[in-house]
Image (spheres, grey):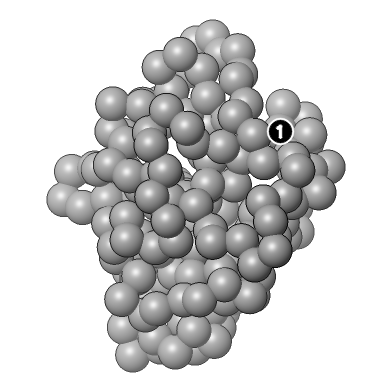
Amino acid sequence: MKTIPEPYAWVAKEPGPKMLKEALTHYGLLEHKGTGSNPDIMKWAKEVGVAGWYTDDSVPWCGLFMGICAQRAGFPYNTQLLSALAWAKWGKHVDDDKAMLGDTLVFIRPGGGHVAFYIGESKENYLIYGGNQGDTVGFTWIAKSRLFAVRRAIWKVSQPENVRKIFLNTTGVVLSSNEQ
């Protein structure tokens, strides 16, 4: 794993939730450009039982990334969740204004959707962490106006104490508009 850059280093110190902790272990993983695929992404597809769908890492893999994190954290995972927009049915519904650390955020983009973890927010944007964001696993800012759904894991015991809404200051932020 690459070192998480300073503006976001605090996230790695958070004690949970488990899905987010698993996700952070993959920071900086890159999709291979051109011929060949990143073997880690292809292993994820095999591990969650969808290797037939993922024959190359050029196939959108944000849903696959969330799936491997859910499965490794011990949460139910359905192969129907490969589509980013399908994550709008995972876990339990959360009102848009109640999103908190580690929640699953589903966004609309031209031609489909995107799914990632909530890290924090400013007045108009969310800071998210996910896969296939600029062909890598990492952080990006995304407009709140693109939000489609907020979902939360169904905790086995109770919600981790550090799961909370996080407000962040941002200036001069370039927003992601197409995560492919």
Whether residue 111 sits left or right of residue 176 in the image: it is: left
Check disc 1: other Cα within 10 Å, few if <14, some if 14-19, many if 20+: few
Question: Relative to 76, does residue 19 appear above or below in the rendering?
Answer: above
Q: Label 1 sits on what residue type?
A: Tyr
Residue 141 visible in the displayed image: no
Q: Say whether residue 163 is visible.
A: yes
Disc 1 target residue: 8
Taking the spot 78% from the left edge, 36% from the top edge, the residue there is: 9
Residue at 53%, 47% (x, y): give it: 103
Position of 101 relative to 57 (above/below): above
Q: Quadrant of residue 107?
A: top left
**Residue 18 vs residue 172, the one in the foreground:** 18
Does 141 sit left or right of 28 as displayed? left
**x, y (%) of residue 12?**
78, 45
State whether residue 172 is above or below residue 41: above
Q: How many marks?
A: 1
Q: Indicate the secondary structure of the residue bearing disc 1.
A: helix
Residue drawn where x is 62% and y is 26% of the image: 166
Q: Nearer the viewer, residue 11 or 101?
A: 101
Q: Which residue extends farthest left?
A: 111
Observer-nearest residue: 76 or 12? Answer: 76
Quadrant placement of the N terminus: bottom right
